Amino acid sequence: MTPRRKPQQSRARHTSGALQEAFVRLLVARDYDAITIREIVDLAGTGLGSFYEYFANKEDLAKVCVHLRSKTLLRALQSCDQNCDGTPLESMACVAVDRLVDIHRESPSHWGVHYLLERRLSGIAAYSKMYERFVREWARLIGAASNRTCACPADTARTCQTILYGLFAHAHLKGLSTARMHVDLDLLRLQSQQALLGYLTLATTPLPLR
C-alpha cells in the first residue's frame, strides 16, 4: 500500500506525514470506527482537499501508516550486519533486538496502534508479502554469521521473526489496553534476547574453529 499520490516535495511530505501522525494520535484514545476524516484533518492542521490528494479514504490512510511503519522495522533489521561481516550470530541477534527496542522506545503508544491496525486491515496476501521480507533478512543474517550454521536457514529465519514479532506486538498491544500506556522495554529486550538466543542455540550448529 502506497499513498494515492506519492508526495515528492518537502511540503507535500510534511502534509502527508501530518495526516498520518494525527490519525495515529487519535487512535491512541479512540476506536477506529469512531474517528472521522474531519477530525484527522483538523488535528493535522490541513484541509479535506489535502487529505484526498494523498488518500482515498480513512482505510487507505491506515494501510499507508501500517506499511510505512513496517518498512521502518525492516530497515532496522537490514542494518544489523553493516560492517559486521564475520560477526557471531548471537551478537547480530542481540543487535537486532536492540534496534527494535530503540525504535519502539520513541513512541510506544503509536507502535501499539500500528500492531492494532495491522491486525484489522492487513489482508493475508499483503501481510505474507511483508512477513517474507523480514524472513529473508533473517536468513541473510544467519548466513553471514561466522560461528554457526543450520540445515534449514529459511525455517530458522521464519522462527526468529515469529519470536520477535510475537513478543513486541503482544507487549505493545497489552500496553495500549491499559489506562496509562506503558511498555517495559528493558524487560522486553531481556525476554526477546533470551527467547531468540535460546532458540538459535538449539536450531543452529557451531562451525569448527579455524
Image (spheres, rainbow, N blue to C red):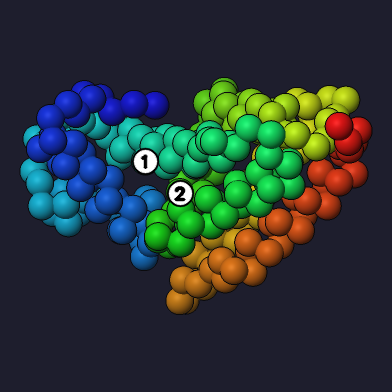
Q: Above or below — where is 156 with respect to 18? A: above
Q: Position of residue 180 (x, y in %)?
A: 45, 76
Residue that sits furthest to the front in the current view? 210
Marks 2 and 1: in contact by CB < 8 Å?
yes
Q: Quadrant of the N terminus?
A: top left
Is residue 135 visible to the viewer in this orientation of the structure? no
- In this rendered view, identify the residue nearer to me: 124 or 197: 197
What residue is at 54 percent from the left and 51 percent from the top?
100
Q: Is residue 41 left or right of residue 102?
A: left
Q: Is residue 29 left or right of residue 169?
A: left
- Mark sitting on residue 144: none
Number of numbered markers: 2
Q: Above or below — where is 174 with respect to 2? A: below
Answer few, some or many: residues within 10 Å of disc 1's Cα (few below 14, many 20 plus, some between 14 and 19): many
Q: Above or below — where is 50 with respect to 182? A: above
Label 1, on which residue? 65
- Amino acid type, label 1: Cys
Dot 1 or dot 2: first in sequence order is: 1
- In this rendered view, identify the residue nearer to me: 168 or 197: 197
Q: Is residue 41 left or right of residue 73?
A: left
Q: Is residue 30 left or right of residue 132?
A: left
- In this rendered view, identify the residue nearer to me: 78 or 26: 78
- Mark sitting on residue 114: 2
Q: Quadrant of the C terminus?
A: top right
Q: Position of residue 164 (x, y in %)?
A: 66, 48
Is residue 210 visible to the viewer in this orientation of the structure? yes
